[in-house]
Amino acid sequence: MDFEKAAHFIWTHGRLLERRVFEYIFHGGSMSNVMTSLTAYQNEDGGFGNAIEPDLRAPGSQPLFMEFALRFLYDCNIKDEELSQKACDYISKHADLKKGIPTIFPSSANYPRAKHWNNPLSTEPSFSRLTGLVGLLKWQGIEHSWLDKATEICLEDIHAQAYDDAHTILTAFYLLESLPQSDYIKGLFQKLSKELITANFFCMDAASHSYGLSPLEFSPSPTSYCSSIFSDETILDHLKVLEHQQEDDGGWQITWEPPGETARLEWRAYKTLKSLMILNSYNKINL
């Protein structure tokens, strides 16, 4: 793996957000610069928009964009009270605690987007989407009158429903991680861990070329909440594959069709950044 080529790819094709995070993680950059670049995507309603998730080019706020922004903070281990309070206000206004929250709103159809967002289920309320948002907000450590009730209801959903999609299991783990590790929470962790192994879009096989989430998505560092689910051998196999997936131009490739070439390069820069962060956390990069 060539770190300098990967860095060059991020400097060449990454958005200011990815460049600031790269600078923060690898070159002692400031947290303030990361927050300035992230909040540039936050709209006046407290939500996030402006194609922060590159597959949807809409300027208006979307729950999908909110999750993307909060995951950036989670990945960087940054907690920000002001941003998170505004985000919670936004989510509380758009969530239905009996149905969940949509991934995207119908208005998103007015803008370029990847074909997978044409799925009509994307605009239907979903508890799995809400669970992830609630978990990421709880991880921020904020106090909000709506959040405690939402947490209780999302935990009930994890307990009652069989989760069969790796994406929804990943976001459910965010919620469990953010809470005191009682016997109840530990039981839910074991439930989700078992469901993950047979879930759709989960790739335990390091040699698989199919689209899906690998164990490294769940355990991006040795101290990750989900690290106990996987053997050291499994993690090592996936790290080896990740290293070899670097392209000749220095970046990592994506396995789906974005709405255009700008989105493709934005995604590739994002994936390159995430790959470097994972490899670095496992001491696979000599800096």
Image (tube, rainbow, N blue to C red):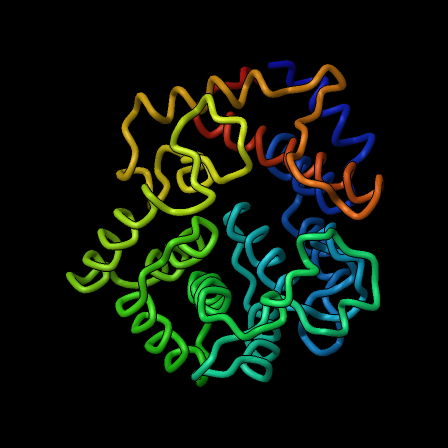
Nearer to the camera, 135 or 166: 166
Nearer to the camera, 157 or 7: 157
Q: Position of residue 221 (x, y in %)?
A: 42, 35
120 lies above or below 197: below
Q: Position of residue 255 (x, y in %)?
A: 64, 35
Q: Residue at x 37, y 41 (%)?
A: 224
Q: Position of residue 283 (x, y in %)?
A: 45, 21
Asked which quadrant contains residue 286, the reply is top right
Q: Position of residue 94 (x, y in %)?
A: 59, 81
Q: Residue at x 67, y 53 (%)?
A: 116
Nearer to the camera, 164 or 94: 164
Q: Residue at x 64, y 61 (%)?
A: 119
For this view, does 200 lie left or right of residue 258? left
Q: Residue furthest left?
A: 183
For this view, does 145 lie left or right of residue 32? left
224 lies above or below 281: below
Q: Quadrant of the C terminus?
A: top right
